[in-house]
Image (spheres, coloured by chain):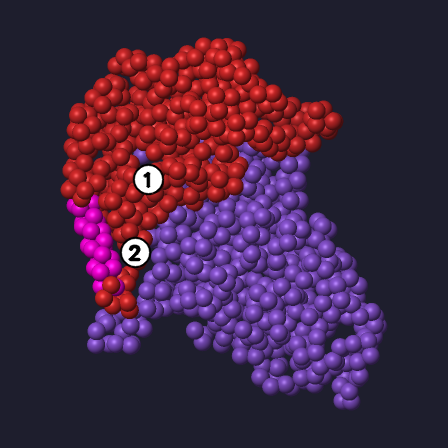
Amino acid sequence: MRRPILAWALVLAAAGVQPAAAQNEVTTPRSYALTNARIVVSPGTVIEQGTIVVREGRITAVGANAQVPAGVIRLDLGGATVYAGLIDAANGAGLPTIAAGGRGGGGGGEAASSGPPAELNPGVNAVDAFTPGGDLLSNYRAAGVTTVGLAFSGGIFPGRVSAVSTRDGMASAVVLRSPVAQQVAFGRKRGGYPSTLMGVLAYIEQSFKDARYDARARAAFETSPGSSPLPPYDAEHEALQAAAAGELPVWFAASGAYDIERVIDLAAKLGVEDWAIVGGQEAFKVAQHVRAAGKPMILSLDFPNPDQMTGRSFEAHVAPASGDDTADEQADSAAAKMLRGNAAALASAGVPFALSGMGVSSPAEFRRRLVTIVEEGLSADDALRALTVTPAQVLGLSGALGTIEAGKLANLVVVEGDLFDEDARIAQVFVQGEKYDIPRQPAGGAGRGGRGGDAGGDAVTAAGEWNGSMDMQGQAFGFTLTITGQNDALSATLATEMGATTMRGDMADGRLSLNGLFESQQGQIPISLNAQVTASEMTGTLDIEGMGTVSMTARRGGAAAGRSHAIKDGGNG
Amino acid sequence: MRRAALSNRIMAVVAGATLLVPATAGAQDIAIRNATIQTITNGVIENGTIVVRDGRIAAIGQNVEIPSGIQVIDGQGMYVMPGLIDAHSHMAIDGGINEGAESVTPEVRIQPNPDDMTIYRALAGGVTSANLLHGSANTIGGQAAIIKMRWGSALDSIWFEGANRIVKFALGENVTRASSNQSDADRRYPKSRMGVEQLLRWWFTEARNYEAEWQAYEQERQRNRNALPPREDLRLQALVDIMNGEIKVHAHSYRADEILMLMRVAEDFGFRINTFQHVLEGYKVADEMAEHGAHASTFAEMWGYKVEANDAIPYNMAIMADRGVVVSVNSDSGERVRRLYQEAAMGMKYGDMSEVDALKMVTLNPAIQLGVDDQVGSLEVGKDADITIFNGHPFAPASRVEKTIVDGKLLFDRDQAMTLEKLIQRAVTTTTEDAS
């Protein structure tokens, strides 16, 4: 497990990071006085004009009249606002994607090919699998994010959460806490049991029982080896023991309303007390249940496809809707508004939550979505709390992060304007006292530019109706592909005579990539589509697990194909 | 009233769709008067009245007073029945029907999806409860979800409280085929009918050992408080629960020989098969089934879709019923669930079942098989107000369901449904015209 850290170091080296920065000890002064600042100490507590003193990576003084000691670099902020560094409580960027298992979010990509299957790897700490490619860390900083909860997406026991700083440096210097939590998700095992949702629920319950049993059996053996049998060693159960014993919190992944309810049920069955839900995109639908459970939500801003929102089956099936139908779009937009209003609804219901960029295409897009959820009714104070104080708590770091107070780590964001105004510029970010000046963005608003290549927008968009055919052993099978969304976050429905499959993915440089799970009688079959897209057509392949790769072509369609009205028939067994 | 205020046609569609359930689902007090009432257990009441209070039937008869202030449905010309029950369904299931990687998985339990559109379709066919079963890929599949058609409800309120715990077994071709279809690495046992029997005996023997291990521990604990308890195994515990009768067996079956085999295996391990599903050759072993205490849930006239389904006759239902087996007819389909009552009608055509016996096959008898006959399946004071209102006798080909009530809540109303569908249709048509 040393290799990813090495890889990380190489990436940093390739990115031109000075070797000195990779050393653990301080090599830059890291002592500043930020004067003439508007200081948002914590949500709702503001010092209109004051000074923050930062020494050796920590905040040493804050106040309207804080003394500036000798020997620090004085920075006049000219009235800019300083917030505590933002925390993205759960993000999977830079971590291997767990291919088959994902329910909601993630998907695609291949997991490491050696070692235990990625979907059942509870012992791995996210930081040990973290390889922040390209500009990931600087993109986080450009969005004001100074701390990230590294969390896997997909799988069943995909690993453990680690909290890291977004400063450049070796893993040893940026890991704030690891492990933070044991991750549990309702994915599937590739090949073998459990292959269904019901199987996964039973599997998780059995695994926690086994973890406790193994611990007891081993203790008995160690106490009286003469009379107790040597228990078999099982790495998976061993790794789950801390969570089963209540020594490590459990983070369950759940997006839809029913999965959230299943988690609440399952947590009670497992007998775990300290837990949270990651995702929670439909938590507003079950807000009272969530509130009664009394656990924090780690809300992803990866808004689901409104067409798939729980509760929309009537409109989606009774209305003979087509892709460009106005009534349908109106209903979609009403649903989309509800989904964007998730955080606001939970705030009104009194549910504590942190915010997460899990599944969101980039930190820049994460910041744009912060603006969106505030527009949908979340108060700026509640939004700030969900980006600072609450995530610091769920990461177990509230002593070190979350507010601008003496003694805490010097994680700060300097904003020219209001954080939740899209046009406000993030000028500087301090991560553990390291100062990073954020370059001015090209025209197009605060969030733009995070993704490099396609930030200016591809000339070609993937969205639209496509009519195509795939070649199955010499036979052509027709399909329609309905794609919605922006190139960096696409939703799609692949409809064949076998039924419809919901897919997600993105397109960059004309290269389209979509992943989904086809619901067959035998269970879910992962499908991925990769194609080169031009204005009028796409050419590529479809990978259907268990069936191999087939070639496909499609042309942009005129007439809408409409939604699938297929009635599911259970078959006569 | 609210609809009239919405001049914007699009708003009407959106609001209509979201209003549909809440607008009708509030009150649990309702009365139906002037109707022909088929009680199933106490004959037919002409010009009868049913009063529902708090979701249960409070009064039923010809001279029943309707309390003031509750919603009244005029049943003139209507035929009122207990809500229909489908004893075999795979509709409205979330996340997979077959946990097919292994052949014995009784620890898993079907996960319902209350938002599934087939629930609304079932309501439109007068069906108010269903037995959502695991598929037939496994010798011992998972536990069932018995649901009421509370469409769009919260997940925890879709379950039919008080119903049996049911597990699905499967025999014959589907199991052995599922074993053969796997890739080499995943190929599983059994591949033959003899393997199915052996596997059943092997697992129940394991379960007996497991139970004995726990009993030994309980005794040991009397002497030694620090004794190490055995490993808890959800799979073996489910099998123990089956042997102790706490989980009832519904067994997918076709051939007479395998039906006999399973009854013998069960008897050897001290339990009974509650219901044989499909059971197309049940007519050959109806006496043995009656003696064992097994019920039957079958198709009316569907067979020949595979070799083991060839030796079937449409008189199967009537013959089994005649020999004392409790028979239901099921849909096994999100589509046939809309016309389950027409399947029941075939009991009268083939084998001269009485009208009420035929109707029992979609009401009281499936209720018995699901362990909910004390709550539903007939119209009696104190039972749940699960009521279906037809515009004529359900066996008349042109009859259709007008209203369906679950727990006293009107969850399907053809008047409202049609209005809504027209509304949406109009909005779509108008928009299309605008665009062209």
Asked whether, in this view, residue A167 is left or right of residue B137, the answer is: right
What SS does tag 1 mark?
Answer: strand
Q: Position of residue B226 (x, y in %)?
A: 28, 69
Front residue of B43/A406: it is B43
Chain A color in figure:
purple
- Corner quadrant of residue B428: top right
Q: Can the viewer see residue B38 in this picture?
A: yes
The mark nearer the N terminus, 1 or 2, is 1
* Residue depicted at 66% across the width and 32% down the height: B15
Give the letter of the red chain: B
Q: Amino acid at mark 1?
A: Ile
SS class of the residue under badge 2? loop
Protein chain holding label 1? B
Q: Quadrant of the N terminus of chain B?
A: top right
Q: Horizontally, is A195 left or right of A567 in the view?
A: left
Task: Determine which residue is flagged by label 1.
Answer: B166
**Vertical side of A32 occupied by B186: above or below:** above
| Residue B100: x %, y % from top left | 32, 46
Q: Amino acid at mark 2?
A: Asp
B230 lies above or below A1 = above
Does the magenta segment cover residue B211? Answer: yes
The residue where tag 2 is placed is B233
- Picture residue at 16% right of the left edge, 33% below the top: B260
Q: Which residues are magenta?
A: B198-221
Per the picture, the main secondary structure of the magenta-coloured stretch is helix
Count of numbered tags: 2
Tell me which corner region of the image, top left, top right, bottom left or bottom right, holds residue A562. top right
Q: Residues within 10 Å of mark 1 (few under 14, many from 20)?
A: many
